[in-house]
Image: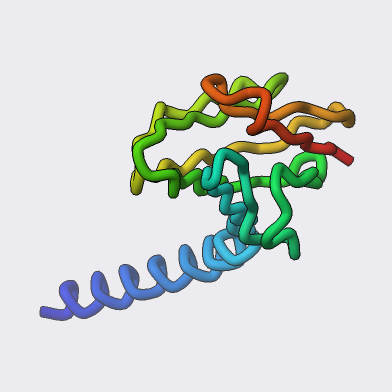
Amino acid sequence: MKNLGLISVILLVSITGALVLFVPLLQDKKLPREVVIVAEDMSFTVSTQNLEGIKNPTLNFIRGEKISILFRNNDPGIRHDLIIEGLGIKSSILSYGESERIILTVPDNVGTRSYYCTFHMLMMKGLIVIE
């Protein structure tokens, strides 16, 4: 019985020590910044970054930043996709009401990239500036 109590104390101390080491690591990890891109009325709109209502806006990303893009199709009867040139991002083809989440880490090389819908490139295209 004495050994069982000693083993319990050792386990408790070990678990507490592990938590003390790992909890700060978990707290330092930042959640990705969410950018909601919506295909509607044959254009892209973004419901974040104070860009609501602007069609095909220029988006600003920061080098090394983690981004979570929620791409949603709100165009009844029309299919859309989202391509981001130079970042290797290509969404699925979405029908009305469908959405897809894309997680990316912004590359370190600054510059301007294009985003567009392959089906409606003349009307649905914008820029991403990496700073």
Q: Quadrant of residue 109?
A: top right
Q: Look at the image and name its color scheme.
A: rainbow
Q: Is residue 51 visible?
A: yes
Horizontal and vertical percent position of residue 124 = 64, 33
Q: Quadrant of residue 47?
A: bottom right
* Image coords of residue 13 (percent x, y): 40, 73
Residue 29 showing in the rendered view: no
Please tell me which residue is depicted at 50% across the width and 44% down the height of the picture.
71
Above or below, 97 against 86 in this view is: below
Which residue, as the protein is rendered here, is positioned at the far left?
1
Quarter of the picture containing the N terminus is: bottom left
Q: Which residue is pictured at 53% across the width and 67% down the height? A: 23
Q: How many marks?
A: 0
Q: Quadrant of the C terminus?
A: top right
Name the residue nearer the viewer: 75 or 88.
75
Relative side of 87 to 109, left or right: left
Of 124 and 21, which appears nearest the observer? Answer: 124
Q: Position of residue 112 (x, y in %)?
A: 85, 29
